[in-house]
Structure formats: structure tokens, C-alpha cells
Amino acid sequence: MLELYNTATRQQQPFEPADGKTARVYSCGPTVYDFPHIGNLRTFVLSDILCRYLAFKGWKVHHVMNITDVDDKTINGALTQGVSLSEYTQQYTEYFFEDLKTLNIQLAWKYPRATEHISQMQALIQTLLDKGHAYERDGSVYFDISSFPDYGKLSGVHAPRMTQCSFSRLDDEYDREEVGDFVLWKAAKPDEPFWDSPWGPGRPGWHIECSAMSMEYLGPTLDIHTGAVDLIFPHHENEIAQSEAATGQQFVRFWVHGEHLIVDGEKMSKSLGNFYTLRDLVEQGHRPQAIRHQLLTAHYRQQLNFTLEGLEQSERAMQRLNTFIERLPRLPLPKGSSAEAIQLIEEAHSKFEQVMDDDLNVPGALGVVFDLIKDINTLIDAGELRDRDRTAVLNFLEQADSVLGLMTEQLEAAKSEPVLAEEIEALIAERAQARANKDFARADEIRDQLAAEGIILEDTPQGTIWRRK
Ligand code: AMP
Ligand code: ZN
């Protein structure tokens, strides 16, 4: 049974969708004011892995991720570039989707944009006003945290201090020390885009976005809400207050928070200037597959220290994996299956699920995959692997990859390529004949000719196999 660590209860708990069928998952998405850095992408890879694994467990998944396309940063960006807000955010939204594709992140069910849900946000704010949880001041609307006794239950922000607190915060982001009534609707400032509202022209606060859009698509109670740890306070605390004050129902059953990607002990962030974008790394020649692997090398609740050396290790790990997948279909194997291989593969299946059930232990799952590859290579070298074992290994890798998303292309290629291309096969046979005749000049010529075409020959105990460089 799948267990997830729940920030709300500070415990690892068995998870099942509330209705037993469909997991309703909401993830705080990107603010589209710049390229995501790979710290942001680590968090998006976490929700990807989570949703892939929920599907692996047989549930239907409704995953919603918002696009924050109106806030201080997007507005400033548009003003600086002298373009409209929508023009400005549209380009970064496109880059965001390109990055998802590059990293083989599966698309969510819905990506609602904040600017397309202003009326839902206004309706929610009106409900909070009607129920006495919010008040209006100078054209802005604030949430009154003293009206919600549970305030602080997620983050542990100390409750007694808050009741004494009577000031109102206009900024969306602030520290624990600055806890106060937070803004739901911001009165328009000169030069800023605005929407009409019952409280005058303005725009929504950041927190209300997520409450309104998650409820719109997933209902009042979410099975799982994800984000990185920096969002626990104030963003998620405020989401709970707004949502539960409005509906009177539990907002989120499981809070899943990912730890940060760090550089030299500090959080990777735009403001510190210590960041890499995916594009930077790809331009430097790093394979997206290796970058994804690197993001998966630490458990999601552990910080991941990003280094280029770490990325190099991932490159080598992926090279091993790719070579294995490429080589396997072309091995001339005897018919049948071997008891040893079947046992190894069955154990890999059950261990994979066991570690993933344990709060998504992805490093453990990677260990299962790489251990199996090592063991199967040993069997190949000993001439003990049979053709039915090969099918079983590929089947295991495919199932593991439906969760890990690391070798999708390679497995596709392994399936679609003819097991042994005839032309190459004929040359390999000719080379074997030449060697038998001690015509090493011709044998080498054939090897060189194939090498020039990007085909590498490898002599194994079972005969010669080939792979692409
Ligand atoms: P943003 O686009 O700034 O709204 O952030 C998108 C997501 O990335 C949020 O869930 C952030 O909490 C998360 N995030 C920001 N910095 C990091 C980091 N260094 N490591 C992991 N996640 C991060
Ligand atoms: Zn959010």
C-alpha cells in the first residue's frame, strides 16, 4: 500500500483517493515571468513522479497545475519590456511547456491560468466577506486571520501571536515573523493591469488563485496538494484558511512538499543569482535524460545539492542504461527462459513497488533498476540469458519507466527497430567468415566501414552484436 508523508500530520500515512477511484491532485505551478530554473523543475518532476505512480497503482489521476500569469513579477516584467501582460506571460508559458517536454514530464489534466479565473476568485472573496472572514479597506480586501482559529495548523506558525496581530499585508510573500491579515484583492495601482470588481478596480492576490482554481476543477477537498517547502508558509497556510473558511470542509487530505534544490548550501533562486535553467544545461551539451536523472537522485524530502560533477555521474549512469537497452534486442539468444533470470526479474518488480510505496523512494527505485541491469549483464556474459528473459526484462523496464520517465525514447527505439537489421547482419556474418579464414584485413575493413556509419560491433560469447554509437 502506498504511504505518503503528510506535512499536515507530520507522519507517513497510507494513501488512497477519497472516492477510491480518482486521485485529485493540485500542484502550485510556475509564475511565468522568466524561464524556470532547475530548482523549480525539480518540484515539477516531483509532481510528475507522484502522478505517474498514482496511475501505476491503478487510480485515475486528475492533476491540476495553475499558471500564475498575474502578480508583481509578471507585471513588472511586462512594464520593463513594454508589452502587454498577456503577451509577456504567453512567451514564458510556452517556454515552460517546452521545458516540461524536454524533461519528459507528463502533461497534467488541466493548466488553468489565473487571468482566466478572475470571476471564480471574486466569487470566493465575496463568500469570505459574507461569512465575516474578510474585510475591505481602501479598495483592497483582506482575510481576517483571527476569524479562523485553525490558522497556523499546517506551518505551526505560533497561534497566540497572531491574535495580537492586527496589521494587513499587501505583499503576497512574507516571513513567519511578518504574519498578518493577508490580501485577497489588491486595489489597482497606476499603470497596472486591473479587473473591475464589487470593491473597485484591482487584481487578485496570489493565494486566492490556488484556492479558487483548485476548487473549480477538483471540488472542495483535494486528495493531494503539492509544492516545494518554501510554500508551506504563507502560501499554503493561506490557501487552507481561505478554502476552509469558505466551504467549512477540509481543503487538503495530504500535503506533499518537496525539499529544495540547493547550490553550495543555498536555495537555488533567481534572487540569489545562483541558478541554471534547463536551456543553459542543454546548451552546454547535457542530455535532458541525465538532468532528469540527476533531479531524481535524492529523495524528494531531502535537499539535493546540484553540481556539474553530479550531472556527469548521471550522464554515465544514463549511458550504461542506454547501452543496455540498445544492446538487449540484438543479442542472439537461445530460446526459452532461465529460472535465475525469471527470479531476478520478479524480485525487481516487487522491490520496485515496495520502495515506491514507501513515500516515493525514487533513489531506491533507481537502485532496483540498475541492480537488475548489472545482474542481467552477468547472465549475458555467462551465456545464460534466454530470449523469453529478454522480453521479461524489457517489460520490467517499461513498467518502471512509466513511473521514472527516464528511458522512454530508448525503450521505444528498442521496440520499433528490427531486431537485427539485415544489411548489418550480413556484414557481421561476412566478418565472422573472414576471421574464420584468418582474413583479418577484410574483418577489420568491415568493422571500420560500420564504425564510419556509427555502428559499433561488440564480440560476445554468443557472437557479435551491434549498437549505434
Ligand atoms: P515559481 O515559479 O517561483 O512560482 O516556483 C515554482 C515552484 O518551484 C514552487 O513550488 C516553488 O516553491 C518551487 N521552487 C522554487 N525554488 C526552488 C528550489 N530551489 N528547489 C526546489 N523547488 C523550488
Ligand atoms: Zn499555489
Image: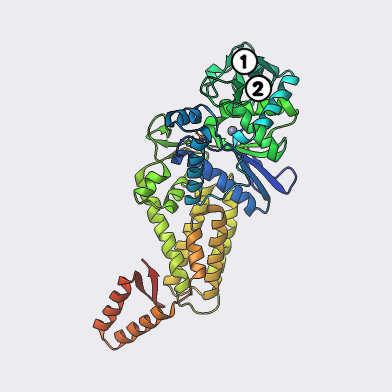
**From the viewer's perspective, is residue 211 above or below residue 21?**
above
Query: Does the Cβ of the disc 1 residue fall within 8 Å of ligand 2?
Result: no
Residue 388, how many percent across, how many down?
A: 55, 73
Secondary element at tag 1: helix
Which residue is depicted at the point 39% across and 83% down?
A: 426
Tag 1 residue: 162
Percent of width and height locating residue 205: 59, 25
Q: Which residue is painted at 60% across and 57% down in the image?
A: 350
Density class for disc 1 (Cα within 10 Å; few <14, some 14-19, many ≥20) is some
Q: Residue furthest bottom?
A: 437
Task: Tell which of 384 and 203 is nearer to you.
Answer: 203
Q: How is the image coloured?
A: rainbow
State whether residue 154 appears in this view.
no
Secondary element at image label 2? loop
Q: Does residue 334 show up?
A: yes
Q: Which residue is mark 2?
A: 151
Q: Quadrant of the C terminus?
A: bottom left
The type of residue carrying mark 1 is Met
Which quarter of the picture shows residue 263?
Answer: top left
Q: Crowding at label 2, few (<14), some or many (≥20) Cα neighbours within 10 Å?
A: many
Mark 1 near mark 2, Cβ–Cβ under 8 Å? Answer: yes
In x, y percent, where is residue 468? 38, 68
Residue nearer the viewer, 44 or 254: 44
Give the left or right position of residue 327, taking residue 241 as reference.
left
- The three-letter code of the residue at mark 2 reads Tyr
Where's residue 110, x and y in %? 63, 44
Which corner quadrant of the image does residue 181 belong to?
A: top right
Residue occupying the point 71% across, 28% down? 123
Is 172 situated left or right of 16 in this image? left
Measure how far apart labels 1 and 2 are at the Cα level: 9 Å
Q: Which label sits on residue 318?
A: none
